[in-house]
Image (cartoon, rainbow, N blue to C red):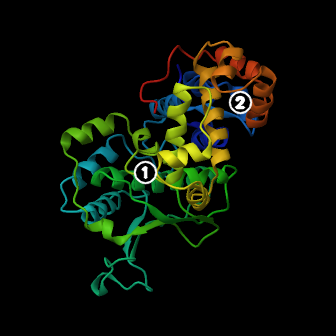
């Protein structure tokens, strides 16, 4: 039975391809290698599975021989990210590791211009207690990215560095804010899920802020851990990992587990009881995370439906029943609302694209 792995908007597929498109490459073979139907790129509501997106990463990497997949002003040679991680792995704490990583990438002309800020003017600098409770640190991408493909690279840099820092200390670092020095992309509503914090576009700079006390956390990873992580990089870091999560993530995982056991998703009160909070508290915390219980239930069903249609051969009527729809017509209406097409049409497109049996290695 297919679990409800996350799905990815087609706008992010387009953004990922924008670098090689700028270079004049034919993207159809790349989409075929990823088993993504080319027709989906023309549908603004379309989504792809995690497995398809991972395959596209691999196909782009093989074509470009560039860790930035053609998205940056200059390519990054394969192995650069691994060497940066090796250089940072044995630092005394996270702050020192980030500083070393920033210096490492500063050695490459045309590479990402990164900065770690330890406290802002209102909190005081490191000499005046930037690590006290409430003080902030910020990871900044200083490149003046203007082209669409470079903006997507800036977004990926913030995500990867945030997840890498969380991975290094073995717990998720909650972001306080994320800002981007460019207008909202077509998939701006996905950013809340990506960053789990307030997001602002059209800002003076691109970066993310977090509690400064994390900079003093010791690193808990060793060479073996690094080797395992690098086998699946960058998607190991682009995927949300469970280093302690937002309330929305906890609810989503509870709903995914429940959907695996029964077609009836629990009501808000049942999930609140499992999380040992009142229904009112759960509603309030989900609102802080920028979502609602109804929206999360809808998203879990949507992702399970897309993955089931793209990767499996379960009859549509059985899939609808497994997802808790009382009749096929209700499932068809919901799926059209989610994606702009019918379940049958989506499955036909996916199978015509030659999606292999089973998910791609590394799907999460």
Identified at 58% across, 73% down, the residue is 204
Decide which of 180, 80 is in the foreground and name it.
180
Identified at 26% across, 42% down, the residue is 226
Q: Which of the two discs, 2 and 1, labels the residue nearer the N terminus?
A: 2
Circles 2 and 1: CB distance less than 8 Å?
no
137 left or right of 86? right
16 left or right of 166? right
Q: Residue 73's spot in the image, x, y percent? A: 51, 53
Q: Residue 188's spot in the image, x, y percent? A: 65, 54
Name the secondary structure under disc 2. helix
Residue 40: assigned label: 2
User: For mark 1, does the 10 Å Cα neighbourhood hold few (<14), some (14 to 19), or many (20 or more) residues?
Assistant: some
Decide which of 282, 32 is in the foreground and name it.
282
Residue 49: assigned label: none
**Disc 2 to disc 1, how far (Cα)?**
27 Å
Identified at 53% across, 61% down, the residue is 197
User: For mark 2, does the 10 Å Cα neighbourhood hold few (<14), some (14 to 19), or many (20 or more) residues?
Assistant: some
Q: Residue 343's spot in the image, x, y percent? A: 74, 22
Decide which of 287, 54 is in the foreground and name it.
287
Name the secondary structure under disc 1. helix
Q: Residue 42's spot in the image, x, y percent? A: 75, 34
Which residue has dot 1 on it? Answer: 160
Q: Is any atom of residue 152 visible in this view?
A: no
Q: Is residue 59 above or below residue 135?
A: above
């Amino acid at each position: 039975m297919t679990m409800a792995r996350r799905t990815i908007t087609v706008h992010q597929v387009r953004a990922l391809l924008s670098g090689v498109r700028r270079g004049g490459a034919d993207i159809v073979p790349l989409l075929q290698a990823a088993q993504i139907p080319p027709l989906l790129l023309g549908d603004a509501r379309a989504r792809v599975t995690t497995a398809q997106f991972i395959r596209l990463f691999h196909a782009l990497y093989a074509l470009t021989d560039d860790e930035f997949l053609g998205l940056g002003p200059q390519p990054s040679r394969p192995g650069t990210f691994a060497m940066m991680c090796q250089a940072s792995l044995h630092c005394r704490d996270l702050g020192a590791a980030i500083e070393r990583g920033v210096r490492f990438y500063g050695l490459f002309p045309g590479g990402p211009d990164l900065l770690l800020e330890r406290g802002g003017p209102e909190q005081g600098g490191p000499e005046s207690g930037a690590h006290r409770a409430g003080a902030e640190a910020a990871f900044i991408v200083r490149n003046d990215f203007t082209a669409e493909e470079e903006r997507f690279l800036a977004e990926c840099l913030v995500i990867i560095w945030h997840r890498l820092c969380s991975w290094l200390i073995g717990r998720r670092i909650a972001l306080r804010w994320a800002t981007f020095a460019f207008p909202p992309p077509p998939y701006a509503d996905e950013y809340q899920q990506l960053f789990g914090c307030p997001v602002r576009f059209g800002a003076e700079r691109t970066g993310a802020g977090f509690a400064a006390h994390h900079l003093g956390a010791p690193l808990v990873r060793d060479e073996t851990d690094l080797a395992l992580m690098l086998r699946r990089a960058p998607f190991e870091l682009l995927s949300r990992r469970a280093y302690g999560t937002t309330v929305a993530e906890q609810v989503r995982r509870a709903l995914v587990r429940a959907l695996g056991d029964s077609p009836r998703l629990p009501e808000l009160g049942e999930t609140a009881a499992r999380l040992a909070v009142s229904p009112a508290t759960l509603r309030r915390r989900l609102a802080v995370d920028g979502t609602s219980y109804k929206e999360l239930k809808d998203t879990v069903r949507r992702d399970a439906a897309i993955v089931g249609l793209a990767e499996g051969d379960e009859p549509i009527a059985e899939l609808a029943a497994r997802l808790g729809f009382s009749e096929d017509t209700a499932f068809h209406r919901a799926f059209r609302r989610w994606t702009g097409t019918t379940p049958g049409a989506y499955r036909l497109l996916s199978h015509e694209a030659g999606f292999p049996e089973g998910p791609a290695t590394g799907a999460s």
